[in-house]
């Protein structure tokens, strides 16, 4: 795929570097992760986008995880605070959704968990609540139930 220019930023169709991925999650307000958690995410995702500034700094990102058939989940949508409000999130989101539609079979099921800062963006691109379904998480307590 050809990289898209969103001047003065450049949209890359690849994963960011490991240290940039970890830094973007932390500095954009997503939960911090370790390099050991980041490595599998970088290599196992279905699709990636990251945005670079004209100085070459990675300032935004997003990825798709899924089975490649019908289920696709958008994750790690993040833009550094000082670069927000410039269309990077929209460009990353639109590019990832376009790739899903171009590579996946018809009628893919595309999901995301929209944290409050991104909900307006996601709704503006057609995402809606899945009520009566409810997003849930199993928090790691360090114990295993038997």
Image: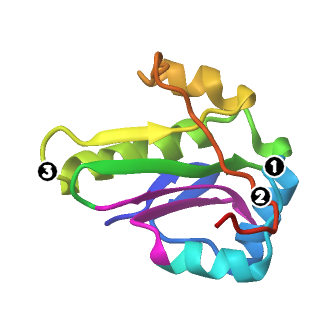
Q: Position of residue 29 (x, y in %)?
A: 84, 47
- Range of magenta residues: 44-67
Task: Please tell me which residue lies in front, 145 or 25.
Answer: 145
Query: Which quarter shows the C terminus?
Result: bottom right
User: Which element is circle 3 on?
Assistant: loop
User: Which element is circle 2 on?
Assistant: helix
Residue at left 12%, top 43%?
A: 106
Name the mark on residue 75: none
Dot 1 corresponds to which residue? 28
Q: CA distance from mark 1 to mark 3?
A: 33 Å
- Of mark 1 and mark 3, the one earlier in the sequence is 1
Query: Which quarter shows the N terminus?
Result: bottom left
Q: Tell me: residue 132, above or below residue 135.
A: above
Q: Is residue 131 visible?
A: yes
Q: Give the colour scheme of this rendering.
A: rainbow
Q: Position of residue 64 (x, y in %)?
A: 45, 56
Tag 1 near tag 3, CB within 8 Å: no
Q: CA distance from mark 1 to mark 2?
A: 6 Å
1 or 3: mark nearer the eye? 3
Q: CA distance from mark 3 to mark 2?
A: 31 Å
User: Which element is circle 1 on?
Assistant: helix
Name the mark on residue 105: 3
Q: Position of residue 67 (x, y in %)?
A: 31, 61
Dot 2 corresponds to which residue? 25
Residue at left 31%, top 45%?
A: 98
Residue at left 63%, top 24%?
A: 119
Q: Residue furthest left?
A: 106
Q: Position of residue 105 (x, y in %)?
A: 13, 50
Tag 1 near tag 2, CB within 8 Å: yes
- Of mark 3 and mark 2, the one earlier in the sequence is 2
Q: Residues within 10 Å of mark 2 (few under 14, many from 20)?
A: many
């Amino acid at each position: 795929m050809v990289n898209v220019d969103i001047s003065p930023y450049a949209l890359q169709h690849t994963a960011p570097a490991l240290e940039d991925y970890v830094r973007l999650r932390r500095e954009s307000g997503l939960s911090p992760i370790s390099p050991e958690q980041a490595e599998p995410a970088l290599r196992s995702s279905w699709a990636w986008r990251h945005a670079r500034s004209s100085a070459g700094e990675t300032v935004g990102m997003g990825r798709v995880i899924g089975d490649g058939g019908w289920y696709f989940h958008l994750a790690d949508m993040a833009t550094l605070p000082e670069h927000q409000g410039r269309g990077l999130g929209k460009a990353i989101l639109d590019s990832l959704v376009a790739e899903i539609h171009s590579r996946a079979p018809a009628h893919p099921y595309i999901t995301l968990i929209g944290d409050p800062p991104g909900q307006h963006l996601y709704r503006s691109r057609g995402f809606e609540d899945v009520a009566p379904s409810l997003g849930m998480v199993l928090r790691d307590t360090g114990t295993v139930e038997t």
